């Protein structure tokens, strides 16, 4: 084993290095003599390129410590000032009280070992004493799937829980402390991932095994009883330690232990608790986006479509078209979704007499007679409905979904459902704005619609829903709508001014500075513009390597975790910020059931029909 350092001496080392047999040295002479005696090498290494930090600007030296095992680097740490503004710092303070070590890179096992050695649990509360160490823990838990499997993490945690490293008088105390650290990490892991862990069999087996170990250890370490109670709550068990003596509880609780009873059951049945976004094509170039329960049947869905499209339900039927082109007429009580929430294919609302889909909107003679429902609805009510709809989607997003979405471009096994729904919703609101304007043949009504959407966008911004506000502004700025010069000329000046102010937020110059400044000033809870947040994470991901010479680039993962934590900040719910929704069926229908044209050619044809090119 050898150590490479970028300076002439070390001030102090974090516990993971001290446990590896490295001494804290204070002077260069002492350093050389001690290392020579122990057979260690202390080299000046110029191979590392250190990032620019504030400490360098202030002329302070930066210590970078590299741990080698069998001639290979396994952990690289860097000492930095402890800065409450920069949550990356995590480790152990030196004697001056203001220095900490951060993980630069390392193997998964060594990063976990350093993490556990850095945790400083409060004797009474069980929580970490250091916010910086808690941030390191959060970084690791948010991103560990990038560099190690859940099964590997489970095995490593069991190994750390059971390992006996100490001898003599301190063995009991140190062993207890280490076990409590592992339990604290598992508790944080479970709270952070929630239903992401519930389905995996190896997690259930891990929880069962760890619970058995804790039960066996309580007799030797009575101080673990409090931790056992918390672990029982985690597993949603009915019994507590107080119900049994140490001998009784081991036997009674162990006999009742089963995977089925003790898995982390935090997710209800998907069919009962979730909602899905359903697309029903009402013409060859447009569909109705409907939010429904997965248990919806064909008759219920057809009723929604007929009401939204102002058609008689008796004259319509629902058809499922498979990807191979085969069509199947759905009977009234047929379920739309399977247990896995898969649709039977493309859903089409057809005329019962023709059994064919309705013609393209550009060929519909009744287009001019269709009423513009949105004009009769209060703009504040519409914006509240939009915000509540978006908030339900946004609040169900887990931070891990952004990690899965960024690192896994292929199918993510359902891990990004809520995130994909919100992104889809953002696109659909933009298309809905375009569709509503371009389906309105009356010039005066189109002017009213523009005013309506500008006010709705302003209300959404006031309600801290930047996702829908952005989508509406972008919909009004698309070429098919912005080219309607005759319509825009008749929009009153005060609305044009308001629209210009809202447009500034969408200005991409200086890396969207206008939006970022406004967003920082907005208090939570708030809904960010999700495409831009994903762009930031993707920029970090693609601009930095995930591995350096087989070592995990933990600096990159910290930057990603720090960006992802923005979701947690935005989802912070504060009392007194709730928006009372309007129970009007018209308002609910206008927001929950969006008629969307998804064909660009149709959009431009409608635009040129309304205002032909001169």
Image (tube, grey):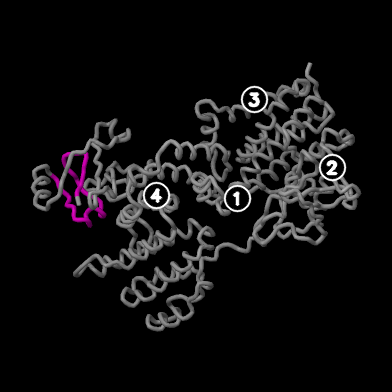
Q: Is residue 120 visible?
A: yes
Q: What residue is shown with label 1?
A: 418
Residue 219 falls left or right of residue 378? left
Work out whether 195 lies above or below 433: below
* Mark 2 or 1: the one toward you: 2
Q: Which residues are magenta?
A: 2-26
3D distance between C-alphas at marks 4 and 1? 25 Å
Residue 539 falls left or right of residue 70? right
* Mark 2 or 4: the one toward you: 2
Work out whether 185 lies above or below 305: below
Q: What residue is shown with label 3?
A: 500
Q: Earlier in the sequence, mark 1 or mark 3?
A: 1
Task: Find out whether the residues at labels 1 and 3 contact each other: C-beta distance under 8 Å.
Answer: no
Q: Earlier in the sequence, mark 2 or mark 1?
A: 2
3D distance between C-alphas at marks 2 and 4? 56 Å
Q: Is residue 575 visible?
A: no
């Amino acid at each position: 084993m050898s150590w490479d350092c970028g300076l002439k001496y070390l001030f102090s080392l974090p516990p993971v290095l001290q446990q590896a047999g490295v001494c804290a040295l204070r002077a260069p002479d002492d350093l050389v003599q001690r290392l020579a005696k122990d057979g260690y090498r202390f080299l000046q290494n110029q191979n590392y390129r250190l990032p620019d930090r504030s400490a360098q600007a202030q002329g302070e030296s930066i210590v970078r410590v590299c741990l080698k095992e069998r001639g290979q680097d396994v952990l690289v740490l860097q000492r930095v000032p402890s800065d409450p503004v920069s949550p990356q710092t995590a480790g152990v303070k030196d004697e001056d009280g203001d220095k900490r070590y951060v993980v630069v890179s390392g193997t998964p096992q060594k990063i976990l070992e350093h993490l556990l050695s850095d945790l400083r649990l409060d004797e009474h509360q069980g929580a970490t004493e250091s916010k910086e160490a808690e941030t390191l823990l959060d970084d690791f838990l948010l991103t560990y799937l990038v560099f190690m499997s859940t099964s590997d993490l489970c095995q490593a945690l069991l190994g750390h829980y059971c390992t006996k490293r100490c001898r003599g008088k301190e063995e009991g105390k140190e062993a207890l402390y280490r076990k409590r650290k592992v339990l604290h990490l598992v508790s944080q892991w479970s709270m952070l991932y929630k239903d992401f862990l519930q389905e995996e069999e190896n997690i259930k087996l891990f929880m069962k095994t760890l619970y058995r170990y804790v039960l066996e250890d309580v007799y030797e370490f009575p101080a673990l009883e409090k931790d056992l109670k918390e672990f029982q709550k985690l597993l949603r068990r009915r019994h507590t330690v107080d119900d049994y003596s140490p001998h009784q509880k081991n036997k009674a609780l162990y006999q009742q232990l089963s995977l089925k009873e003790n898995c982390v059951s935090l997710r209800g049945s998907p069919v009962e608790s979730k909602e899905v976004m359903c697309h029903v094509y009402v013409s060859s170039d447009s569909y109705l986006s409907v939010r429904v329960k997965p248990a919806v049947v064909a008759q219920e869905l057809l009723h929604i479509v007929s009401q939204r499209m102002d058609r008689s339900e008796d004259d319509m039927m629902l058809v499922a078209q498979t990807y191979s082109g085969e069509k199947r007429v759905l009977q009234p009580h047929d379920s739309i979704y399977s247990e896995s929430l898969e649709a039977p294919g493309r859903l089409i609302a057809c005329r019962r007499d023709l059994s064919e889909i309705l013609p393209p909107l550009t060929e519909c003679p009744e287009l001019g007679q269709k009423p513009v429902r949105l004009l009769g609805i209060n703009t504040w009510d519409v914006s509240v409905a939009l915000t509540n709809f978006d908030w339900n989607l946004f609040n169900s997003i887990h931070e891990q979904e952004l990690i899965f979405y960024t690192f896994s471009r292929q199918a993510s096994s359902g891990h990004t459902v809520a995130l994909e729904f919100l992104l889809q919703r953002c696109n659909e609101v933009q298309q809905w704005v375009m569709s509503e304007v371009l389906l309105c043949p009356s010039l005066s009504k189109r002017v009213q619609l523009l005013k309506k959407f500008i006010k709705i966008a302003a209300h959404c911004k006031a309600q801290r829903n930047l996702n829908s506000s952005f989508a509406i502004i972008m919909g009004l700025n698309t070429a098919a709508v912005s080219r309607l010069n005759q319509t825009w000329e008749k929009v009153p000046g005060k609305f044009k001014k308001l629209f210009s102010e809202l447009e500034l937020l969408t200005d991409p110059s200086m890396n969207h500075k206008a939006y970022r400044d406004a967003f920082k000033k907005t208090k939570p809870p708030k809904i960010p513009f999700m495409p831009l947040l994903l762009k930031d994470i993707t920029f970090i991901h693609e601009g930095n390597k995930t591995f350096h010479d087989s070592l995990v680039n933990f600096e990159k993962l910290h930057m990603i975790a720090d960006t992802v934590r923005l979701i947690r900040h935005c989802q912070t719910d504060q009392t007194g910020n709730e928006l009372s929704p309007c129970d009007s069926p018209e308002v609910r229908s206008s927001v929950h059931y969006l008629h969307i044209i998804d064909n660009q050619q149709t959009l431009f044809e409608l635009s040129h029909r309304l205002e032909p090119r001169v």
